[in-house]
Every structure is written in structure tokens, then in C-alpha cells.
Image (spheres, rainbow, N blue to C red):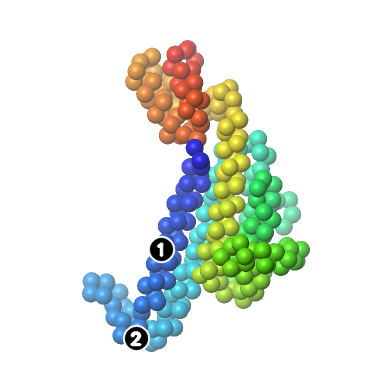
Amino acid sequence: MSKSAYLQNLLDEIGGSINSLNTIAVSLSHLSPSSVTPSGLNITWNPVNVSVSAKNARRFAIRSSVVFHAEMLFEYLSELSKDPFWASSGLNFNVPLKSKDSKARRVSAFCKTIPDIEREWVILVELMCHWRNKIVHAKSNAQISSKDRQYLESKTQEIHDNYYHFDANKAIEDFRADKVTLKEATTLTTFLIKCCTAIDTYYLSFVKNASEADVINILSKEKEFLVLTKQSKSPKKIRQVKAWLNMHYGMLSSDMIDGLVEYYTQQSI
């Protein structure tokens, strides 16, 4: 399995969001002073200035995407932190930091310990989370540290060359002014996905290295599964146990699942 259900859900949600955002941007670009409300659309739409209205709508959509994508990140990390395979990592997004706690800072602290995540990715994702706060809470003054800002500035050219000509310095300036652009929103989301993909790879390494005894211990807390295992030995029981494991623990190898099926259906538990 190349990715967990946690990551797949995040990718599906964010992918749909980006597609919707791009659709909105394209649709708004076609508005003109002669545009009228389509028949059958039961709304009142009579802007004084179509160009200004389209610009404001585009800004609203972009800002909304920043909030949504940050929330999806928080949900991904929160749900992953509850997973029993993840417990041995020692990382838990749901535990507040001892000092200056915020979800943006938790994201940063979490990501910094994951293998194969570049420091600039972490800083830019933290920036996106602070931007989410700025949008939701008008009085928010949270921001990345001066040390992180200096590091980001030192990597400006490298980021520009490697990531779609993204201007990190301009992003910092736009953050201060709370004027996020479509390119900034989508590129920051790219860094969010890169971080989550690395986190997911790390998570799957714990799954891969788990022993059958480890998995049996985890399954001992799955009440729905235990009900299935208490059935009398039969082909139906084998099918149901295997189907349940594939549905809920599909990230396990096929050999592991086959071994568990045999354990739970051929022996007295």
C-alpha cells in the first residue's frame, strides 16, 4: 500500500478543493458587464461593478481554500496521532505544546522530527497555518519566527527555481498584508502535501515493521472485529474476517493479513 487512508482522504479533499478553486477562477475571468444571472438560478445578483465583484469573489474563494486546507492538515495529523501503529513515534498532534501553544506551532514541531522533510517546507506550511489564523481571527498577530524568516530568505532563489517560480519573500510580504494570491495558496498547499506524504511514509514504516503479535494486540481492542472472530469456524467466517481486515487494515501486507486470517479462523482464540 503506497499511502494510508488518512493521506488518501486528505488528497481527495484537497484535490477536489483545488479543482473547485480553479473552476471558480476561470468562471470569474469570463464575467463581463453584460453578464446576467442564468435562468433557473434563483438568486439576486446585480453588482454595481462586475469587475470589483469578481475580484472580491476570487479573493474570498482563495482565502477560504487556505482555511480549508489548513483544517484538513489539522485533521490528518489529529487522526494519525490516534492510530495505534503511530504510538511508537512518540509524536501526538493532539497534545498541546508546553509553551506558546497553537496548532500552527504544533504542525511545525511535529514536522521537524519527520525524516525527509526539508526545513523550508515546514516553515512555509507553518506560514500557511498562521495565514489561516489571520483569515479566521482578524486580530491574530501570529507569524513565523525571525530565525525562520531569515532562513526562508536565504533559500529564496532555490525555492523559486525548484517550485514553480514561487517567491517566498513576496509570500511573507503578502502574509503581513493579508493579501494571499491564487499561486501562493496553491503552492503553499503543495508544500503541505509534501510534508504529509513524508509523514505518511514514516507512518507506513511503523506498520511495515509491526510484528503479528503487535497487530494482534491492536486488534484486541477492535470490538466489531472480535465479534466476527467469535463465530463458529466456517468459510463465511474466513470471508468476513478477511474482508474486515482488508477494509480497516488494508495498509498491512497481504502476507500479514493472510496470517491473521489463519490465526483468527483456524485456532481457538
Residue 143 spot, x, y in % from top left: 68, 66
Q: Which residue is mark 1?
A: 20
Q: Residues within 10 Å of mark 2 (few under 14, many from 20)?
A: few
Residue 106 spot, x, y in % from top left: 66, 53
Residue 265 spot, x, y in % from top left: 43, 17
Q: What element does badge 2 sit on?
A: loop
Question: Taking 81 as reference, is 221 above or below it?
Answer: above
Residue sitting at 45 percent across and 29 percent down?
245
Outermost residue toward the left in this view: 39
In the image: residue 52, left or right of residue 191: left
Structural distance between the alpha carbons of marks 1 and 2: 24 Å
Q: Residue type at mark 2?
A: Pro
In the image: residue 131, left or right of residue 28: right
| Residue 33's disc number | 2
In the image: residue 148, left or right of residue 201: right
Q: Residue type at mark 1?
A: Ser
Which one is nearer the viewer's eye here, 162 or 141? 162
Residue sitting at 51 percent across and 70 percent down?
182
Residue 143 visible in image: no
Q: What element does badge 1 sit on?
A: helix
Outermost residue toward the right in this view: 147
Residue 100 spot, x, y in % from top left: 72, 57
Which one is nearer the viewer's eye here, 155 or 87? 155
